[in-house]
Image (spheres, grey):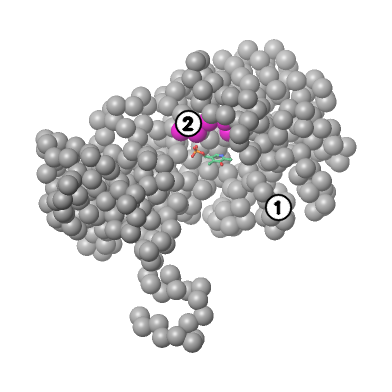
Amino acid sequence: MKKVPFITLEKAREIRESIPTPFHIYDEAGIRANARALKQAFSWNPGFKEYFAVKATPNPYILKILHEEGCGCDCATYTELLLAEAVGITGHEIVFSSNVTPEQDMRKALEMGVYINLDDASYVDFLASLGPVPETVCLRYNPGGTFSLGNTIMDVPRYAKFGMSEEQMMGAVTRLMQLGTKHFGIHAFLASNTSTNEYYPTLAGQLFRLAVRLRNATGAHIAFVDLSGGVGVDYRPEQPRCDIRVIGEGVRAQYEEVLTPNGMGDVAIFTELGRFMLAPYGHLISTVIHEKHIYRDYIGLDACAANLMRPAMYGAYHHITVLGKENAPLDHVYDVTGGLCENNDKFAVERKLPEIQIGDIVAIHDTGAHGFSMGYNYNGKLRSAEVLLKEDGSFQRIRRAETPKDYFATFDFSEFHFGE
Ligand SMILES: *Cc1c(COP(=O)(O)O)cnc(C)c1O
């Protein structure tokens, strides 16, 4: 589908007067509409809840908007738990899906009374060593082998570090029941950034059948099935877009085929979507500050891979719109780069774009998830501001940009001369 930015050149210029580029901007209206569509797609399941994967966009203003739309949080670390707590999200509005979990993190999760999702059967004793086990515990499943949809191998769970085998799960359930756990959740994340409507229904079918086997073998009450993340977005204009309504109906068909006839019609469906909830509703806004023409033509931005790591790290495609030139012919071919001393610091390679001038403002699309959050400080590059484009068209800075002082804050500079 044609990629249309949610911000105009005029708006970008207006914001740039008070918030210099580069900055990440989020579209409140888009976030809310999408969260409502997800809720609607699963409204057939009374216990349905989306637990937004905090790592995708760890900003309290974003978490608050999603919370207003009925979403909780999926946290993986102590700090993410603190962030959710600061927004007033706690208890069963949080799933704690951690792995290689430090004791401090697990204690915090217990203290907040969240749903704890255990990555391994060995965590049962770890949990029990910290106090009484919770009444409800979730277990993370890894089926091993390969995960396929039709003839396509989506991922290879047997090489993944997450989760436990079915046999280990049986043992963990039995042990937890002895320790006093009454209700169970089961969770699996088997493929990332999927572009088909079949992923969730296929995963749900597997987990529902597992839930029946677990219940039959142990007598355990399965309270919820957590489909985790993995529903993708169309980063490329020519890519198909997932249809959440079709996905919800696909999961429902599996539910009615597997769970309902087995007397398990009370199982709640949880999701932990990150990318699907936020990616399309974020842009990285950046100004063109240099151009050079050697063996290729290069456009240099004031943003770099430290603001958006996905292209450098995964070779990921992010669409680029030159604001104000939305309808100009794509008759130039550029590499669009940042200023890190790394040749992989390229937002686009040999990309067809309109003719670009220094001072142009570009919107890099689909940066709302795993964008700012994967940022770093290499080369002394500072993290950017984050801005919320509100439903009424006004904007709000929801995080200021870092200053050199922030960058140096963890040094003891008393022996040196810091000259800001
Ligand atoms: C990263 C992650 C998610 C979110 O994944 P998306 O691909 O952004 O939907 C959900 N659950 C867990 C446990 C994760 O690690």
Magenta residues span 189-193
Instruction: Determine whether 66 is above or below 286 in the image.
Output: above
Task: Tell me the distance, in whole angstroms, between the alpha carbons under discs 1 and 2.
Answer: 28 Å
Work out whether mark 1 precedes mark 2 in sequence or the reverse, and give the earlier one.
Answer: 1
Q: Position of residue 75 (x, y in %)?
A: 59, 47
Q: Position of residue 10 (x, y in %)?
A: 17, 51
Which mark identifies residue 228? none
Give the residue type that dot 1 points to. Answer: Met
Q: Is residue 313 magenta?
A: no
Q: Is residue 253 visible?
A: yes
At 76% from the left and 31% from the top, the residue drawn is 169
Q: Is residue 134 visible to us here?
A: no
| Residue shown at 66% from the left, 27% from the top | 143
The residue singled out by tag 1 in the image is 106
Q: Quadrant of residue 400?
A: bottom left
| Chief SS of the magenta region | loop
- Give amino acid for label 2: Val
Q: Residue at x 46, y 49 (%)?
A: 57
In the image, 144 versus 191, the foreground residue is 144
Which secondary structure lies at badge 1? helix
Residue 115 relative to residue 150: left or right: right
Q: Describe the element under mark 2 as helix, strand or loop.
A: loop
Q: Position of residue 333 (x, y in %)?
A: 17, 40
- Residue marked by disc 2: 231
Q: Is the shortest distance between ligand 1 and the CB of mark 2 under 8 Å?
A: yes
User: How busy is the neighbourhood of tag 1: few (under 14 within 10 Å), some, or many (20 plus)?
Assistant: many
